Amino acid sequence: MFEAAKVGRKVSKSEFKAAEGELRTQLLEVQRKLRHSDIPVVVIVSGVEGAGKGSVVNRLNEWMDTRGMQTFAFWDETDEERERPRYWRFWRSLAARGEISVLFGGWYLAPIEHRFRNRCNDAELDAELNRIVDFERMLTEDGALVVKFWFHLTEKEQRSRLKALSKDERSRWKMLPSKSKFSKEYQHFERVAERVIRNTDTGISPWYLIEATNKRYRDLTVGRTLLTAIKARLESNEGFCVPPTSHAPTLPEASTARVTVLDHVDLSMTLDPAEYKPRLKALQQEINELTWDAYKKKRSCVMVFEGVDAGGKGGAIRRLTNAIDARLYRTIPVAAPTDEEKAHHYLWRFWRHIPRAGRTTIYDRSWYGRVLVERVEGFATPPEWQRAYAEINQFEEQLIEAGDIVIKFWLHISQDEQLRRFKEREQVPYKQHKITDEDWRNREKWPAYKEAVNEMIVRTSTEFAPWTLVPGNDKKYARIKVLETVCERLREELARPVTGYTLCGIRKDE
């Protein structure tokens, strides 16, 4: 595979100088057009040590407008990164629409180094590469352009450069443990790299192999390749579209799916008012103890509250937060996305609020808006919400692998009860802020929302993150049901030993 990157291509100083000015002009022009588009660009810079990756990125920043570019290096994990799922650090570095992110190594860095040091086997590496392919597919399906460069050198050239780099305190190579292995085990590293590239070189996010022996050839090739890739993406009349590849079950059409999972929610469930306060107090006390236990064990908790309008989410969340020390949780109310959030993949705004180890994040509405309100109201196209089921399941699975506890609630009430609550909100002064014209419009679409909820539950109630359907006609019963479920899940999860997520077979804390 790498023979094509060892043929000795060269560019003279005069040729470089003649080409540089025009290339720089074209890059600035295409960057200006990109800024007015809805395309985020992610550039992965990887390759053998000593190939000059840092010099290439510095050159790109010289040629282009740095106001539309950001560069990220993933040398060491910060405390914040270590206390969250692994991909949290990458989501934070993704470019907004119209901008460019340059990632040194990106999500390839750790898998390559772990396999190179024999800390995992080929099967474990392949499993991680499959996740990477899915991740890049998700980004490209959302409109991103992923450009991946692999810089390569001959063994002789690398040995010469690493010897020079050993005297440069700014070189990442000098900071690496066991750095001598790179020169002594060149062929092993090359085999690992070939496996990585072969398994992740896809039509939607291909690898570009760059011969890095001649610096001028290297820099011009990267600039021209990036220019061509962005221009092609901008000039695409119909945009980039990849058919959804979800393996979720096919459900009946709306006209035949008359009975849904919501029809099996027993809305007649009630709680004796005399039992409410004693049970509430006992459950809140237990939740307080359990959340402190989770803090000590560094187990994060992500709670999702969804439900029909006036279904009682707010009341249930208040009873829950009254039980948790304010220093341990955050409540995230999810409304229409801001301009900043619209400029990213829809999951970006939820990834950014994932809690640190031991803390709890409560989402009042969540990423399920993509398959509920965005689906019903037409804010998301059918391909967008159809592929969201698999994307959401993968997202939640990553949380679980990181040791997070995921608890999801759907609070359900009847149409008659919703109507009664709507009218009450209109008449009671301190509740009037809760009712809007949008609530009434949503009520008219009850059948469409019911169908969407049914499909959501069927396709995203997984073994690792199941849905709890809460009968909500009796508010007191619903609140106790929520607190009981939280206690039960926390007890079960905190009693279970957790090794943390693995990356190519390596535990998070290793």
Image: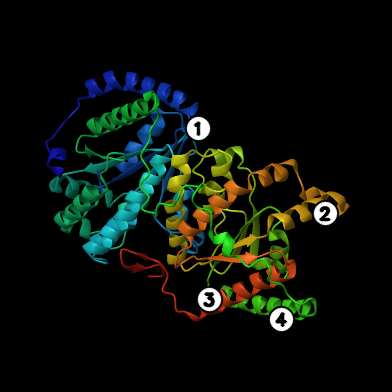
In the displayed structure image, the side of residue 77 where residue 468 appears, left or right = right
- Which image quadrant is residue 206 in? top left
Query: Residue at label 3?
Result: 297
The numbered mark, 2 or 1, whose residue comes first in the sequence reads 1
Spatial CA span between label 2 and label 3: 44 Å
Local packing at callout 3 (Cα closer than 10 Å; few below 14, some 14-19, many 20+) is: few
The kind of residue tagged 4 is Ala
Of badges 2 and 1, nearer the viewer stands 2
Q: Residue at x 65, y 72 (%)?
A: 481
Relative placement, left or right, of 492 versus 121 is right
Q: CA distance from mark 4 to mark 2?
A: 30 Å
* Residue 53, image x, y percentages: 31, 42
Looking at the rendered structure, the number of numbered marks drawn on it comes to 4
The residue that disc 4 covers is 282
Q: CA distance from mark 1 to mark 4?
A: 55 Å
Residue 234 falls in image quadrant: top left
